[in-house]
Amino acid sequence: MNAPRTGTGIAPEFEGCAESIGSGASQSMLQGSLRSSANASLPREGVARGTLLPSTDLDLHRSPAHRLNSVPGRPLRVMKFGGTSVGDASCIRRVTKIIEAASRADRVVAVVSAMSGVTNKLIEAGTRAAAGDIAAVDGVFDGLRHQHETAARTLIRSVGAQMCLVEQIAALIDEGRHACRQVMEQRELAASARDLISGIGERLSAPIVAAALVDGGVPSEAIEATEIIVTSSRHGAAEAHIELTRLRCNECLGPRLLRGVTPVVTGFLGATVEGVPTTLGRGGSDYSATILGAALGADEVVIWKDVDGVQTADPRFVPSAETLSEASYREVADLTHFGAKVLHPGTLRPLVKCGIPVWIRNTFAPEGRGTKITRDGVRRRRKVLASTTDVALVTIPGLCTARMQSTLASMLANTAASRPGLLLAARGSLQDDASDDASVVVSSELLEHVVSVLRSGLGQDRKSKHRVEVRVNRDVALVTVVGENPQEAPVMTQRTLDALTAQGVEILAMSLDSSRGSISFVVARDALSVMLVTAHREFQLKLHR
């Protein structure tokens, strides 16, 4: 069998990190003050770590007296907690203990996701509303109200504080019902309405976490991200305006931090300059944390999840997977690009210029060190497996790759530039250069768009009146070895292919990107476990050998 050919790797979203960064929303509080700020002349350089500036001063290299970290021994730490970390009252109590311990030595800004499963329920409510199913909508919100009130009553001892929190929960539930009734009238779940409805989960969880902290003796206040994270108007995948966000953080969070208050900020959310709610996309609370970390000049960002850190493979499939002690921005960005769920794809972008370290740690095993992610990582790059089933394989039969390479690459580049989600281009066959089928691996979300672009572009290029045949296979998994030494790749790849053949596993497509040291394999979805175990062994991913 021939050695694997080099595919056309599409650069991940991490490439070319720019001035804007992603965020999400809920509706209020920005309209007046931000309209005037939006027209200001903004600085181009990043703020030094720990710097808190007055809202009228746009020169981010002045005012050293406003440094948040000027108090000895009081660094600034942004700590994000995901949905499983705040999944119920017992989980939230564990989170408050982590925050309380950190706040003894550090200034802390907490960022929280919705309680586990809540965002899915809210999206379901919006979808049911568009279909006119009022009973289903009411059922969702009745359940959410009970879930959050139960957590509030379990966590808060003060009757007065408990009643206040329950009233706040009821108001948010009513807001969600009202938004769904508007959707029902229009018979359509518009992107803006979807953002508003799906963001209610974080707005419910943040006040509960803040109240639990206060109940435990930690001064705290819930802050909606609409007050501080200013975004573009792209619903479902908004980009944050970093300088306006920095101004809002200085105005809103700065005074609280200086008074010793721990803000609890809604993750996933933000708002446009006009105050229209937006969201970052699923998993966006990770992104929210690094946005705030960069805006505040934090000393570090800690992302608390239900995993020990960045692992050499998905431990659900590979029990021998190990946790990396340290990794670089680029390594983790490559992993997220190829489908690993370790972080939201845009998480590290805000930190590229300022170099703030990010930790991934386990809420349920806080004694563990986790993985530290830095600009440079460790000197010797480690090999790690990324995997995902949220993809499709798009194949164009009979396309001569050698003759059509430039046309295909041009179309893919344009697609990737306009919308994220195109993972890589690969060969559908490993044997005959002249008759290769060209294959593209795309995210499920991007599938319809890519198929349309390929049919249109290739049809025009061939000057043919016949419809271009495009085959789509949704029942696939993508496994990528990230960090491979290009010189060792052919030997290890061949060894892996031989082992898979012996187990009856067929490789549907492959791509070797020597510039990034990544090798990707596409297999049937039901072969994912075998593929991961085999690749982990044959590529020698164990850290201690």
Image: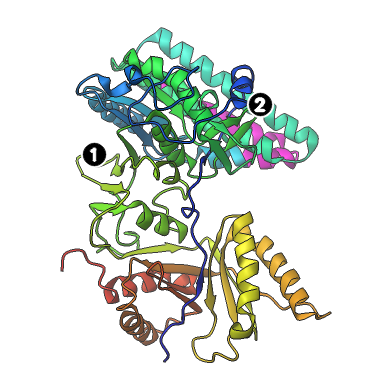
> Does residue 149 show up magenta in the picture?
yes
The residue that disc 1 covers is 366
Q: What crowding class fits label 2: few (fewer than 14 Cα within 10 Å), some (14-19), or many (20 or more)?
A: some
The residue located at (48%, 48%) in the rendering is 17
The residue located at (68%, 34%) in the rendering is 135
Q: Is residue 65 left or right of residue 436?
A: left
> Which secondary structure lies at badge 2?
loop
> Which residue is outermost to the top?
160
**Residue 192 screen position, x and y as percent:** 68, 36
Query: What kind of residue is marked 1?
Result: Pro
Query: What kind of residue is marked 2?
Result: Glu
The residue that disc 2 covers is 274
The residue located at (31%, 59%) in the rendering is 315
Task: Count the numbered circles shown.
Answer: 2
Write the start and end of the magenta stretch as one range: 124-153
| Residue 209 vs residue 221, the one in the foreground | 221
Main secondary structure found in the magenta portion: helix
